[in-house]
Image (spheres, grey):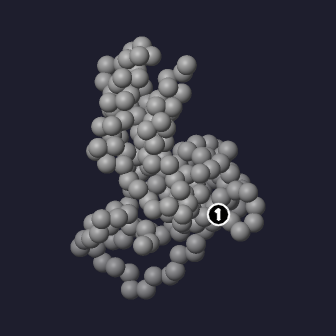
Amino acid sequence: MALQDIVAQTVAGLGYELVELERSAGGTLRVTIDFPWQPQGEERFVNVEDCERVTRQLQYTLEVEEVDYKRLEVSSPGIDRPLRGQLDFERFAGEVIDLTLKAPMGAAAAGQVAPNRRKFRGTLQKPDTGDGWELTWSDEPPPPQPGQKRAKKKEPVAMQVLGFTLDEVKDARLAPIVDFKGRRRAGVQE
């Protein structure tokens, strides 16, 4: 049985889902877990006790399966959680994500963005019609640094929309945006 299958079955048996499995050249096995998404359910977050529980079970399972590794690390997906499949995209619709496409935009952008651009940050949305996904963003200039003068009047920056399918995605992650005044991700509605 493949390592991916062994770890996924063990993690699922404990009530979690496998988000990512990475094996480094130094023998470290990194396992990222999360709770399975339930559309109408309450959002739950992985804590230290969850990681300990999975670590103990994986140590036992990997020993029985005679998997060679030097170190095992089990963690939560973190603030920049990777989005892997259709369920992840549905779960995080409305959130700000960082998206990297497999191929650059090319002429498809009709001069709106650089033709060799592949990386975008914007709000993930499901369009009303069609199968794909949309990313809405504006290329607003960064705020001035402390001590710099601000422009008196700014022209509003136009919103842009990128349509894409999951087949075109090389990497997608939640954007690591933190609201330090509260204990939740910025932009998350209660």
**Residue reaching furthest bottom?**
152
Task: State whether residue 21 is above or below residue 92.
Answer: above
Task: Indicate the quadrant where residue 131 lies.
Answer: bottom right
Instruction: Tell me which residue sits at (35%, 24%) in the image.
Output: 59
Instruction: Give coordinates of residue 109: x percent, y percent.
Output: 68, 59
**146 vs 175, nearest the viewer:** 175
Amino acid type, residue under disc 1 in the picture: Lys
Instruction: Tell me which residue sits at (65%, 52%) in the image.
Output: 105
Q: Residue 108: tell me if it is visible.
A: yes
Position of the C terminus by quadrant: bottom left
Task: State whether residue 7 is above or below residue 174.
Answer: above
Instruction: Give coordinates of residue 34: x percent, y percent.
Output: 43, 46
Instruction: Tell me which residue sits at (38%, 53%) in the image.
Output: 45
Task: State whether residue 142 is above or below residue 77.
Answer: below
Instruction: Give coordinates of residue 157: x percent, y percent.
Output: 53, 75
Task: State whether residue 135 is above or below residue 27.
Answer: below
**23 vs 156, nearest the viewer:** 23
Q: Which residue is mark 1?
A: 126
Position of the N terminus by quadrant: top right
